[in-house]
């Protein structure tokens, strides 16, 4: 396994060149015009997997974007790892905030800059290259399957049906995912939990057309004023969410676990400085890590209505819109929350406007216990390459499909993420440090090694 | 004066053709790219005035858009009417809501459809044609001056300085303006008062970049959530504005005057139906006409921030913006109100964000007493052409420059508006009925006639 460092050293440029080709494909899943790019990305992933040494690779159609499946089955007695990743990326606006074009990858200050450099093209490519190494050096200790989808950034709407349909094909002992982050380059960490998500678009309609604010202002409800008031009422002065029943299924984390979480390295001054904030803000009674890890949120992701051009236009608009999302904790059922908000928001609307709430997507939270083989094997792998034991972290982000895997396929996932907070995923100037990219390629084969070893031992110990 | 009907009948097509040429110029004053169109409009107005018979016409430069000045001075003993109008128009978005292109005028169902068809190209063109008639038929009973500006829709920022500089040139007995509406085609009315205006743009800055709402959501203030809460707090549950000191200078209108106002024809069911509203909404304790005529307002004219594209993007945005305006009543000083809001809004911002308020423009309210010569002459003119006495109306709209005229030039204005509520000014599908356009051309010469007559009588009666 030690050959991995030599392998990386002698293939560095080739690996980057191939990754860059992948990054140049603008595979934005939330914009319908980019659908052909998802097919280009699928073709590229399929070709890369075949080149890396899988026995077969196939592009499956779904009702939405395609899924690439590939496999290398060496011994039915050996354990099977299913690698999950996604080839779709987030939109790039505001595009004028990017220092280099989002789909023209560039290396600056030892970092790869491009949309998807980290999330999740960079991280998914690490797996292809780690697998290639195991094949080339004849060290593969298990069977491997790959499932690379194209709709993660829009909530994987068609992957549950795909899993349902291909249960047999996807059979595995563990699902391995690199779509999360680590605390710092010198503080390796493993994500042991994820938040869930609910996402809505709301539309407030006042008068049937934009009105002159002088002639009608004061007598006709302004849909933007109304929307602001409705949004304002969704949280109280302590940062609590006021949707009735919202917290019913939230499990309070124990005092012990909160004490453990508090040991993770965190410097509030640096955190604020990095974001240019004078003050943090959130739910009363919880720390920053708790607010982002174990508590649900209410965030308006976008808002628009009326005149937004240059200068002044005195208009009383006909409509106002908002995109709203809640991060949820694992025990909150996202469909239930989606409907709770919809009913509440529609019911609270004043009669002077019409309110429509569309449920856009959602996903369930997830917890991976730290005393199971997948977690322990990952822990050993990081220890081998970073020289220190990784910290378990509850992440605030959501990968909705992870809990679906458990529900449909009955398989636990382990989240070996190599991203950094500074990677600016979902933002302008997304990047992925070269250190993290190559460290990922170095660490993943160790996971294969330890996981296969542990599973073998478990089998040997069977009565 | 009766020849006016024949004159209109035999010149109808020519008048419309010339108006259409004027309407085709996209002279949007709030968008800098359209500046050359303001010069095209000025050239066109100047040529039209010269053709109509003024002695001289000139385009004056200002720090902003040009002003067209023209005059026909026939006898220094005769009274002088100064016609004020504007050649600039509002933006046209949302442009997809227009049934025909905003700058390609079209007649449908006896109405002219185009941006500016009413406000104020249609109405200003009536004056040019009414003047042309008086010249052609040798009936001009007074001196006439024209001042057509290009910045009314952005609050006439440079016209006060222009008036200051050209006080002598602009000397007149009355200012005649057609930039308002009338109650209905069979209910003529004269605007006896106008509301003032204050207009701001606010910018809320949270983190220094758009953030992943999962990784940061809950711990970092979301500028859209904050903006919504701040806007929500600006009015209370009774529709009162909560800015401290906001109502200090509001003069309560007397019970008698409110009773008189209540006699104006108004049908709430029709009003709601025309706007497709189930319920009206406004300040508690006031009727619809009072809410739009004698009470100040707080309206968000535009709002934007975060992701507003297709589908779902889970982002915690860096910034949120709003364009906010207040209609003011005559005694409220607009600079004072502009600063009151700015200080209040900036002071109430939580420390977790930065708030910047820019004052975009403003204007003073105005009252024209109904017992003065300008009002009475206008009343007679409408009676002559409509066959019934017009109703005095307090309009909710603002023409900020009207009160500046009084302050700087010491001249009262009379507001002879021929627009209808259904003209959709400032909105998609702005239109002006042919009836109103030609009725305006018919009525204006009668104002000249009666006003000159009344001023002559006044002079004869001097001791």
Image (cartoon, coloured by chain):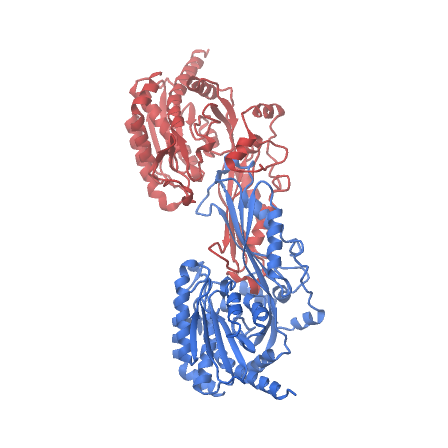
Chain colours: A blue, B red
- Residue A342 against residue B165 in the figure, above or below: below
- Residue B328 against residue A101 in the figure, above or below: above
- Residue A98 against residue A225 in the figure, above or below: below
Which residue ends up furthest to the right in the rendered image?
A255
Q: Position of residue B61 (x, y in %)?
A: 35, 38
Residue B57 appears in the picture as rendered: no
Residue B32 appears in the picture as rendered: yes
Q: Is residue A235 left or right of residue A114?
A: right
Which image quadrant is residue A375 in?
bottom right
Q: Position of residue B456 (x, y in %)?
A: 41, 14
Nearer to us in this view, A127 or B383: A127
Image mark count: 0
Which image quadrant is residue A251 in?
bottom right
Residue at image position (44%, 59%) is: A31
Nearer to us in this view, B220 or B371: B220
Q: Position of residue B122 (x, y in %)?
A: 38, 31
Q: Is residue A185 left or right of residue A260?
A: left
Residue at image position (40%, 21%) is: B443
Q: Is residue B457 left or right of residue A450?
A: left
| Viewport quadrant of the N terminus of chain B | top left
Residue at image position (58%, 47%) is: B231
Nearer to us in this view, B293 or B29: B293
Q: Position of residue B453 (x, y in %)?
A: 41, 15
Residue at image position (33%, 43%) is: B36
């Amino acid at each position: 396994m030690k050959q991995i460092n030599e392998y990386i050293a002698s293939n560095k440029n080739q690996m980057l060149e191939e990754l860059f080709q992948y990054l140049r494909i603008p595979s934005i899943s939330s914009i319908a015009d980019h659908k052909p790019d998802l097919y280009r990305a699928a073709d590229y992933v399929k070709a890369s997997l075949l080149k890396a040494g899988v026995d077969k690779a196939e592009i499956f159609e779904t009702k939405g974007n395609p899924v690439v499946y590939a496999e290398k089955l060496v011994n039915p007695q050996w354990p099977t790892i299913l690698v999950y990743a996604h080839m779709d990326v987030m939109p790039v606006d505001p595009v004028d905030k990017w220092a280099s074009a989002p789909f023209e990858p560039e290396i600056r200050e030892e970092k790869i800059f491009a949309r998807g450099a980290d999330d999740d093209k960079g991280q998914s490519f690490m797996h292809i290259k780690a697998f290639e190494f195991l094949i080339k050096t004849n060290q593969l200790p298990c069977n491997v399957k790959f499932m690379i989808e194209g709709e993660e950034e829009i909530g994987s709407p068609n992957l549950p049906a795909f899993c349902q349909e291909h249960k047999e094909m996807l059979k595995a002992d563990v699902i391995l995912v690199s779509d999360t982050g680590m605390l710092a380059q010198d503080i390796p960490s493993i994500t042991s939990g994820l938040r869930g998500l609910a996402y809505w678009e709301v539309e407030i309609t006042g008068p049937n057309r934009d009105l002159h604010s002088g002639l009608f202002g004061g007598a006709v409800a302004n849909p933007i004023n109304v929307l602001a008031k409705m949004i304002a009422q969704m949280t109280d002065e302590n940062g609590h969410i006021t949707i009735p029943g919202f917290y019913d299924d939230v499990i309070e984390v124990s005092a012990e676990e909160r004490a453990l979480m508090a040991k993770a390295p965190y410097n509030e001054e640096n955190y604020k400085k990095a974001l240019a904030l004078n003050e943090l803000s959130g739910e009363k009674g919880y720390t920053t890590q708790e607010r982002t890890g174990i508590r649900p949120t209410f965030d308006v992701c976008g808002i628009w209505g009326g005149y937004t051009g240059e200068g002044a236009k005195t208009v009383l608009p006909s409509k106002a819109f908002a995109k709203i999302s809640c991060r949820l904790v694992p025990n909150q059922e996202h469909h239930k929350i989606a409907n709770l908000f919809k009913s509440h928001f529609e019911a609270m609307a004043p009669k002077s406007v019409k309110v429509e709430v569309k449920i856009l997507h959602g996903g369930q939270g997830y917890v991976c216990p730290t005393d199971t083989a997948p977690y322990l094997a990952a822990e050993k792998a990081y220890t081998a390459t970073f020289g220190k034991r990784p910290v378990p972290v509850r992440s605030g982000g959501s990968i909705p499909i992870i809990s679906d895997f458990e529900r449909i396929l009955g398989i636990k996932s382990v989240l070996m993420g190599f991203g950094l907070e500074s990677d600016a995923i979902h933002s302008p100037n997304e990047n992925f440090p070269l250190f993290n990219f190559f460290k990922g390629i170095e660490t993943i084969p160790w996971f294969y090694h330890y996981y296969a070893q542990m599973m073998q031992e478990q089998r040997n110990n069977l009565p």
